Every structure is written in structure tokens, then in C-alpha cells.
């Protein structure tokens, strides 16, 4: 039985690929060409998927940054503490609140911050400021007595406004500038003090007289208001007389203080 000779498809033909003969060209032509095609999901879209490697290092990077910030904060905290200790050791004054001792609201330390030759004047100025505080507070008390005796509520509100504004404004406008002028020998702060202290003296003289221009003058315990009140109520009149005496003393003390401080200012400015 004759069967045709079929070639074995799995037999490899020995062909030299580096030869330029016809057999080599025929072999290369039988090798299918491979083209680069983008392969996506489902081979429908040519989308490429990039996986950023930086995201893996992001937590470590943030951890390093936080550690660096923490170290910087600790370094600054140590530097601040070192400076504060150096300031305390050097005796440099700090504006911490220390007066009054039972409820500190302002900084006040004449014995440590004011030069020795100016401490007496500063104590006199402090007595003047404390005097106007006492006058305004007692003025409110006397007006309350007058109000109870039928003087009206309007004078009470005015006296309260005088106290609430007069006490902090006197400290801010003329006492604190004088305190800092004595401490730093600043001519500008001395000028600021003289300007507003003259206004303070004018108010004290006005309060001691209490002319009948604002609610018949009964909102201030001056001499004219005391004469008017004592005819209606002896008790209220006595309180007004005491208030008049306080405003007179404050006016005289203030005139003496501004004279002394002006002589001190002229002496220091000339030297």
C-alpha cells in the first residue's frame, strides 16, 4: 500500500539564520512579526496603570517632618526659657502684674524699677493717683446717700460714670506715662504726663467747686453741691462736705506734685 510521504511539521529545519542565502530568507519570512499593541482592561482601551511609589513613602516623610517640627519647638522653648532666666538674673524689669497684691491688675514696683533719686517723686505721684481713686469712689457713696434722700437716680449714674472712666483713664493717661518716664528718662513721656495731668488738676478743681451746670452739680461732691444738699438732708450734706474736702486735698496735692516733677524734669533735661 503506497502512502504519500507527509513531512513532519514538528521537524526543525536546520537553517543558518545568519546566512544570506535563499533558505535563510525563507526562514525569516516564515517567522511572524510581533507588534507592540497597548493592552488595557479587556483589551478595549489602551489605558496604562501607573502605581506611584511615592505614596508608599508618604507616611515616613510626614513622620520625619513631624519629628523635625517637634525638635524645633523644643529648641525654641529652651531658648525662651534661657532668655527669661538671663533677664531675671540681670535684674531687667518685666511688666508682670503684681499690684494690688490680693488681685494683681497692673505692674507697679517703684523700689526696684525707679532710680533712687526719683523714687520720692514717684511715690508722691502714686499718692496723687490713689487720691483721685479715693475721691471718685467716695463721690459715688455720697451721691448714693443723696439719691436715697430723694436726689434722683440721674446723679447716681453720672457719679458711676465718673468713677468707671476716671480711675482707669487717670492711670493710663498720666500715671503710667510718668512711671515709664521716670524709669527710662523719656522726654516724650514726660510731655504726655504734663498734658493730661493738667487736665486732671482742672477736673479736681471743677469737682471741688461743683458748679450747677450738670444736674445742678449734685453728681459731684463740691462745695456748691454740699450747700444745696445740706438744706434738704443733713446726712447727705455731711457726706458731700467730706467729698468736698477730699477733692480740695487732691487739688492741692496735684499742684504740688506737678511743680516738683516739673523742677525734676528741668534739672534732668539740663544735665
Image (tube, rainbow, N blue to C red):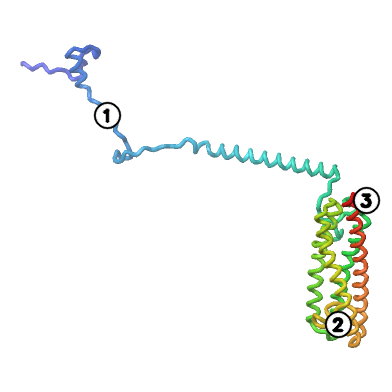
Q: Is residue 76 visible?
A: yes
Could you tell which of marks 1 and 3 lies nearer the N-terminus? 1
- For marks 2 and 3, give the CA distance: 45 Å
Q: Please state if 206 lies on the left or on the right of 19 as rendered.
A: right
Q: Which residue is mark 3?
A: 116
The mark that comes first in sequence, 2 or 3, is: 3
The part of the image, by quadrant, that contains residue 6 is top left
Can you tell which of label 1 and label 2 is closer to the viewer? 2
For mark 2, give the secondary structure: helix
- The residue at the point 62 percent across, 41 percent down is 66
Residue holding disc 1: 35
Q: Nearer the viewer, residue 16 or 84?
A: 84
**Quadrant of the rendered image containing residue 28:** top left
Q: Position of residue 254 (x, y in %)?
A: 90, 66
Q: Residues within 10 Å of mark 3 (few under 14, many from 20)?
A: few
Earlier residue among tags 1 and 2? 1
Taking depth in this image into account, of 130 and 47 the one nearest to the observer is 130
Nearer to us of marks 1 and 3 is 3
Residue 238 picture location, percent across and down: 93, 80
Q: Position of residue 37 (x, y in %)?
A: 29, 33
Mark identifier at residue 146: 2
Amino acid at each position: 500500500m503506497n502512502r504519500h510521504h507527509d513531512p513532519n511539521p514538528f521537524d526543525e529545519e536546520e537553517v543558518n539564520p545568519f546566512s544570506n542565502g535563499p533558505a535563510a530568507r525563507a526562514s525569516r519570512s516564515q517567522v511572524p512579526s510581533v507588534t507592540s499593541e497597548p493592552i488595557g482592561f479587556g483589551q478595549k482601551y489602551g489605558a496604562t496603570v501607573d502605581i506611584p511609589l511615592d505614596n508608599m513613602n508618604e507616611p515616613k516623610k510626614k513622620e520625619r517632618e513631624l519629628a523635625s517640627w517637634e525638635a524645633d519647638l523644643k529648641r525654641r522653648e529652651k531658648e525662651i526659657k534661657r532668655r527669661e532666666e538671663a533677664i531675671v538674673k540681670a535684674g531687667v524689669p518685666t511688666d508682670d502684674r503684681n499690684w494690688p497684691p490680693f488681685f494683681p491688675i497692673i505692674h507697679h514696683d517703684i523700689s526696684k524699677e525707679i532710680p533712687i533719686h526719683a523714687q520720692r517723686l514717684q511715690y508722691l505721684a502714686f499718692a496723687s493717683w490713689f487720691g483721685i481713686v479715693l475721691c471718685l469712689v467716695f463721690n459715688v457713696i455720697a451721691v448714693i446717700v443723696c439719691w436715697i434722700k430723694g436726689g434722683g437716680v440721674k446723679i447716681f449714674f453720672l457719679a458711676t460714670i465718673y468713677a468707671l472712666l476716671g480711675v482707669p483713664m487717670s492711670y493710663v493717661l498720666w500715671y503710667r506715662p510718668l512711671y515709664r518716664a521716670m524709669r527710662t528718662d523719656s522726654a516724650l513721656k514726660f510731655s504726655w504726663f504734663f498734658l493730661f495731668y493738667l487736665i486732671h488738676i482742672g477736673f479736681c478743681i471743677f469737682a471741688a467747686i461743683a458748679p450747677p451746670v450738670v444736674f445742678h452739680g449734685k453728681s459731684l461732691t463740691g462745695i456748691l453741691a454740699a450747700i444745696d444738699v445740706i438744706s434738704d438732708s443733713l446726712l447727705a450734706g455731711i457726706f458731700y462736705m467730706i467729698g468736698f474736702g477730699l477733692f480740695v486735698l487732691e487739688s492741692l496735692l496735684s499742684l504740688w506734685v506737678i511743680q516738683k516733677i516739673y523742677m525734676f524734669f528741668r534739672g534732668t533735661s539740663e544735665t
